[in-house]
Amino acid sequence: MPGWLGLFINPYYHARQGLYQAILGLAPEIYGRVIDIGCGYKPYQELFTTQDYVGLEYDSPDNRANKKADFFYDGKKFPFSNNEFDCAICSQVLEHVFTPLAFLSEINRVLKPGALFLITIPFVWDEHEQPQDFARYSSFGIKAILEQQGFEIVKHEKTVADLRVIFQLVNAYLCKAMLGTNPFLNIIICAIVMSPFNIMGWLIKFITPGNSDLYLDNVVLAKKRVI
């Protein structure tokens, strides 16, 4: 959730800001008992006013030690009953799932009929969290696999659909090429080398047209079909 300071010290400013704004806009739609699948550190939890916010993660020693999950699962079956949740959130996870149809089917199973599902998925991005990086999804691809698994699209947004994409990719490249383990040195490098690309991207979006075919992320609000 980068503020104005992120322009100067966050190499992923445009990506993070785009996701944050899109999720913030859809947050009022999320209600009741919510499951955050692949919750990590639950970075968006404070955006939602919900009855119960449950974090789920893949069961591994690292996740148990470092993530804020309430439950863990074996990579196949979620530890919940059918029709248990009012809404689900899954942010920047699907590209790391080797069996996406089975994964989406399991999400559908634990949701109540008519429940809402907020999912974000990268479209233009580098390989990350290797070797668990398996796919990129176009807007048509994500629509197709969601519909195959019993969902219908309610809203669909493409984030950073303008020339900021180019500046963000430059900074993503520089981040991997230049940043190390020293946090103070990293801040200096970001401020000197990467902040100009953040600032140029922020300025140029006001004077150039958007392009809905080239963007960073899909942000989709879907609904479980009532059979």
Image (cartoon, rainbow, N blue to C red):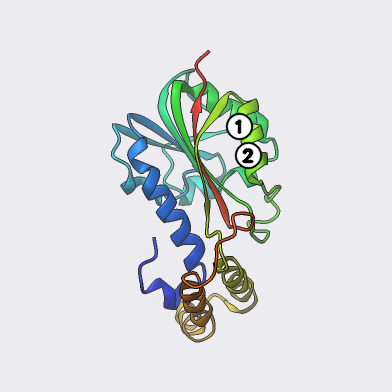
Count of marks, rendered view: 2
Residue at left offset 47%, top offset 58%: 18
Report which residue position mark 2 lands on: 142
Q: Quadrant of residue 213?
A: bottom right
Q: Are marks 2 and 1 in contact (CB under 8 Å)?
A: yes
Q: Quadrant of residue 99?
A: top right
Residue 115: x percent and y percent?
44, 25
CA gap between label 2 and label 1 equals 6 Å
Tag 1, which secondary structure?
helix
Residue at left offset 54%, top offset 70%: 208
Residue 63: x percent and y percent?
52, 47
Report the residue that reaches farthest toward the top.
227
Q: Nearer the viewer, residue 204 or 178?
A: 204
- Callout 2, which amino acid? Ile
With respect to residue 162, does 178 lie above or below? below
Report which residue position mark 1 lands on: 146
Residue 213 visible in the current orientation: yes
